[in-house]
Image: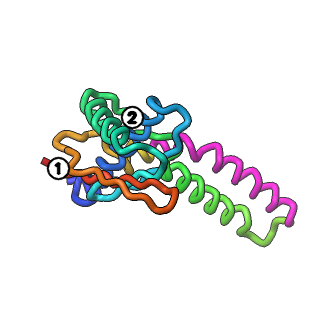
Amino acid sequence: MNLLELWPFAAIRRNHALEHATIHVLSERHLGVRVVGRSDWAGFTLYGPVHTDDVAAAVSAALQRLRAGEFQLAIHPRCGTNVATGVVLAGLTSLAALHGKRRSRLEKAVQLSLGIGAALILAQPLGTRFQQRLTTSADVRGLRVADIRRQERGSLVIHRVETAQE
């Protein structure tokens, strides 16, 4: 059995996919909405100025659409996976460019600049691949929403979406 299919990894991946799909649906229905999400094994949390009824409707639609085969909803271009991919690539590139004593500072600076540029270019497509294969799972069969709770901290609106596997 694949490690990614074991709990809690499988639960996190499914919730991450549902989080992304929910944000896609919210963005379709409310142009310009700014929402950030964070997933875990018990569900996901959305941060942003959205009404609870809109969140509930978006989660329901997202779940239905994923089940109907709209797997692309599980992938989001502004996912933290893309950022993390860029950071790791930039770090590795920096290490490679700055390592070695036989090159001048100018050569190292040029290699560093080119390497970081390449890391930034590759971050989006590689991050998308990592989302598809590692950090999300659009297979949401048996996943259900157990609860949606709203909380406000000053002007910050937070919705906690709890999920359960049937």
Please determine whether, in this image, residue 54 is positioned above or below residue 100.
Answer: above
Q: Is residue 111 magenta?
A: yes
Q: Residue at x 63, y 62 (%)?
A: 91
Q: Is residue 127 magenta?
A: yes
Residue 61's x, y, as percent?
A: 30, 32
Give the structural element (helix, strand or loop) at label 2: helix
Residue 43's x, y, as percent?
A: 29, 54
**Mark 2 or 1, nearer chain start:** 2
Q: Which residue is mark 1?
A: 165
Q: Label 2 sits on what residue type?
A: Leu
Residue 19 circle label: none
Residue 32's x, y, as percent?
A: 56, 36
Q: Which residue is mark 2?
A: 73
Residue 152, quarter of picture: bottom left
Magenta highlight range: 105-129
What secondary structure predominates along the stretch shown in magenta?
helix
Residue 142, quarter of picture: top left
Distance from disc 2 to disc 1, alpha carbons, whole Å, reads 20 Å
Give the structural element (helix, strand or loop) at label 1: strand
Q: Label 1 sits on what residue type?
A: Gln
- In this rendering, position of residue 135 left or right of residue 112: left
Local crowd at mark 1 within 10 Å, few (<14), some, or many (≥20)? few
Most distant residue in the left direction: 166
Most distant residue in the bottom direction: 101
Viewer-side residue, 139 vs 60: 60
Q: Residue at x 58, y 47 (%)?
A: 123
Please determine whether, in this image, residue 2 is positioned above or below residue 23.
Answer: below
Residue 16's x, y, as percent?
A: 36, 49
